[in-house]
Image (cartoon, rainbow, N blue to C red):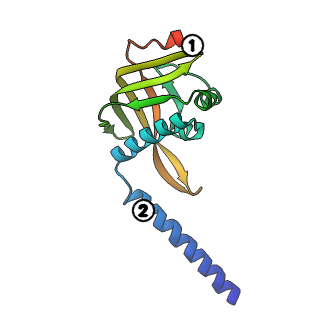
């Protein structure tokens, strides 16, 4: 009898904690715009530190640059660890949200190395498209997460000459 009560107490606590977390994430969580800005900032910060997981976490499975698949996830991870790209948004971030997608057009400063060639360039009008995807929090709670689906670089930045695109 005591084991049964203890079991139901544990189940009740478990359900209450997960229920509270679900409500916190769905009803009282940050707005879509705040989540998008945070995802962009976290991925850029992780890139500067060479933390590939922090960048890959925010890339959609079908991520593209200028409508081309840039590389495999493994190659992207190696690049981030080795190059630690310093990409900084140099203007305000104002996402335009439309249901499951969002777009941000911002100026960026890029300082990195691609195939032993240094890049130190400011790019105007970089367009980043985000896709709202389902992820799991705590392994069991479905939550929405904004991930970068595509990046469109302005015409003045030739990705081909650096071995990409």
Q: Quadrant of residue 10?
A: bottom right
As drawn, 37 above or below 72: below
Residue carrying label 1: 163
Question: Is residue 150 shown left or right of residue 57?
Answer: left
Q: Residue at x 57, y 58 (%)?
A: 138
Horizontal and vertical percent for residue 94?
Answer: 29, 37
Q: Quadrant of residue 57?
A: top right
Q: Residue at x 37, y 17 (%)?
A: 154
Q: Secondary structure at mark 1?
A: loop
The quarter of the rendered structure image containing the N terminus is bottom right
Pick whichever, 25 or 49, lies toward us.
49
Q: Earlier in the sequence, mark 1 or mark 2?
A: 2
Mark in the foreground, 1 or 2: 1
Q: Residue furthest top?
A: 161
Q: Secondary structure at mark 2?
A: helix
As drawn, 73 above or below 16: above
Q: CA distance from mark 1 to mark 2?
A: 44 Å
Mark drawn on residue 24: 2
Q: Residue at x 46, y 42 (%)?
A: 42
């Amino acid at each position: 009898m005591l084991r049964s009560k203890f079991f139901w107490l544990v189940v009740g606590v478990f359900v209450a904690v997960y229920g509270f977390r679900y409500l916190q994430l769905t009803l009282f969580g940050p707005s879509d715009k705040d989540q998008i800005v945070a995802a962009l900032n976290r991925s850029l910060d992780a890139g500067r530190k060479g933390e590939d997981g922090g960048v890959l976490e925010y890339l959609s499975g079908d991520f593209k640059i200028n409508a081309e698949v840039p590389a495999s996830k493994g190659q992207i991870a190696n690049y981030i660890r080795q190059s630690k790209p310093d990409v900084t948004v140099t203007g305000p971030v104002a996402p335009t949200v439309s249901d499951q997608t969002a777009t941000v057009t911002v100026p960026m400063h890029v300082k990195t190395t691609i195939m032993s060639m240094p890049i130190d360039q400011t790019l105007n009008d970089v367009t980043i498209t985000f896709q709202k995807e389902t992820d799991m929090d705590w392994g069991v709670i479905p939550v929405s997460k904004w991930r970068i689906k595509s990046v469109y670089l302005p015409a003045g930045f030739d990705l081909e000459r650096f071995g990409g695109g």
